[in-house]
Image (cartoon, rainbow, N blue to C red):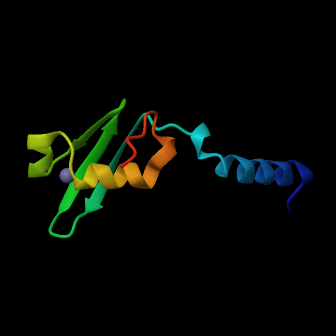
Amino acid sequence: MIDSGMINKIQKAKEYAAEPRRIQFHSFKVQFDGMNDGHAVEYKEGNWECDCNYFRGHGVCSHTMAMERVLGVMLPSPVSV
Ligand SMILES: [Zn+2]
């Protein structure tokens, strides 16, 4: 049973979903299936972490860059590539 309150919430959810800028991640952890290997990628208060070798040397890697592309405007300060 869907009442009018629920219908309003669904409508609001659609409006919010069209405005992803309203949503900002603080932290999350993902398992990234890379072409050769799986990697643990973490985002914490604006900083990326990845357990791959390239990230250790450069502070950025294809995995974190891919995450930035996927999440785009939802990150507090998106690095547009
Ligand atoms: Zn990586």
Residue lying furthest front in this view? 81
Residue lying furthest right in this view? 4
**36 is higher (above) or lower (below) than 62:** below
**Can you say which quadrant of the picture contains the N terminus?**
bottom right
**35 displayed left or right of 28:** left
Q: From the top left corner, tell me how far across and down residue 56 is, in percent.
A: 10, 42
Q: From the top left corner, tell me how far across and down residue 33 is, in percent.
A: 26, 65
**48 displayed left or right of 72:** left
**22 is higher (above) or lower (below) than 38:** above
- The residue depicted at 45 percent of the width and 50 percent of the height is 71
- The residue depicted at 72 percent of the width and 50 percent of the height is 13
Residue lying furthest top in this view? 45
Total number of numbered labels? Answer: 0
Q: From the top left corner, tell me how far across and down residue 81 is, in percent.
A: 36, 49
Q: From the top left corner, tell me how far across and down residue 14 is, in percent.
A: 73, 54
- The residue depicted at 82 percent of the width and 52 percent of the height is 6
Q: Nearer the viewer, residue 50 or 19?
A: 19
**57 displayed left or right of 29:** left
- The residue depicted at 29 percent of the width and 43 percent of the height is 42
In the figure, residue 48 lies in which quadrant? Answer: top left
